[in-house]
Amino acid sequence: MNKLSPIVLFVYNRPWHTRQTVEALQKNPLAKESELFIFSDGPKDEISINKVLEVRQYLKTISGFMTVTIMERKENIGLARSITEGVTEIVNRFGKIIVLEDDIVTSPFFLEYMNEALEMYQNDEKVISIHGYIFPVKKLLPEIFMLKNPSCWGWATWKRGWKLFESDGKKLITELEQRKLTKKFDFDGSFPYTNMLRRQIAGISNSWAVRWYASAFLKDKLTLYPGKSLVINIGQDGSGTHCGSQNLYKTQLTTEKINVKRLSLEENLEVRKIITQYFKSIKPSIFDRIMMKLKSYIRNAKYN
C-alpha cells in the first residue's frame, strides 16, 4: 500500500461526541501510521465558549496517531466554510484526504477500507469519492458498489475530485433545471436534495454537502459505497448545529472487513432502486414536518 491518506477531523463544541469519534478512530490498526489534522472552529457566542474550550483541552491529549496537528480558529467561520477551506488546504498538500466530523464513529476497519479504495481508484477519473456510511435498508446489498451520490458521513477523495467542487449553489441549480435533472437528483423525487440546494441558495441553510453532491452529479461522477456501514452518526440527537433529533438514519456498525476490489465504473441501478424505496419509506408525514419545524424554531430561539 502507498503512503496512507491524512485524516482530517472537524470539531466545534461537542466534547462527548468528539471523544467518541476519536476513540473509535484510535481502534483502527492503521491509526498509528496516519497523520491526523484537526480543525477546531471558534465560538460563535458566549454560550459556546466553554464547550469549545473543553473540546480544545481534550484535543491536546490525543495520541495514537503518527502525528496530531491542531488548527484552532479564533473566530467562528461555520461548518461549511471550515470544511471547504480545511479540505482544500489538506488535499492540495497531500493529493488525497479522509474526512470526518465530530459525530462520526468508525469501525476498526474504516481506515483500511478508505486507504485501499483510495489507492485502487486513484487513477479512475470517473470515481470522485469513497464513502463509509450506507443507509439502513432492509435488503441485502453487495459488499461494495457505485452510486452517483457522494455524501458526507465519513468520506474520502483526491485532489482531482475535490477540484470539481462548485461552491456557487445558483450555478448548480440552474444547470440541474436546464438539463431537467432535478427529479433524478432527488432519487426520483424520494428525497428533497433540490429543495436543500434551494435553501442553501436562499441562506436558510449553509450545506456544503448538497453542493458537493450536485457538483459530482452534474459531472456524472461515481462514489464507492460499502454494503455494510463502516460509520455511524451519533450526532442525530439534537446536539448539532445542523442536525435534528431522529433515528431515521441509525444503522449498525459492521464488525467485518470490507473487501475492496475493482468494479465496473457504472452506477449500480438495483441498489439505487433500493435506496429510493428506503427514502420513500422514511418520508415524514405533514404532522412530522410541522413538529420538526416547531422544534427547530424553539431550538434556534434559545440561541438568538
Image (spheres, rainbow, N blue to C red):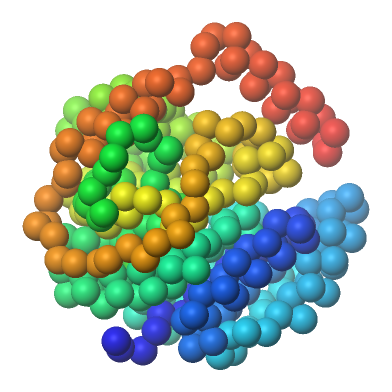
Q: In the rendered image, is residue 73 in sight?
A: yes
Name the one closer to the observer, 145 or 46.
145
In this rendering, the answer to whether 4 lies above or below 239 is below
In this view, the residue farthest toward the top is 287
At horizontal 40% and vertical 61% (from top left) the residue drawn is 256
Decide if residue 180 is on the left or right side of residue 131: left
In this view, the residue farthest toward the left is 264
In this rendering, the answer to whether 304 lies above or below 15 is above
At horizontal 19% and vertical 28% (from top left) the residue drawn is 180
In this rendering, the answer to whether 271 lies above or below 287 is below
Name the one closer to the observer, 40 or 73.
40
At horizontal 68% and vertical 45% (from top left) the residue drawn is 240
Q: In which quarter of the image is residue 272?
A: top left
Name the one closer to the observer, 62 or 294.
62
Decide if residue 23 is on the left or right side of residue 152: right
At horizontal 71% and vertical 65% (from top left) the residue drawn is 19
How far across and down, in percent of the image, does residue 86 sit?
53, 70
Give the quadrant of the N terminus: bottom left
Give the quadrant of the C terminus: top right
Q: In the rendered image, is residue 194 in sight?
A: no
How far across and down, in percent of the image, does residue 273 sit?
23, 31
How far across and down, in percent of the image, does residue 183 sit?
26, 25
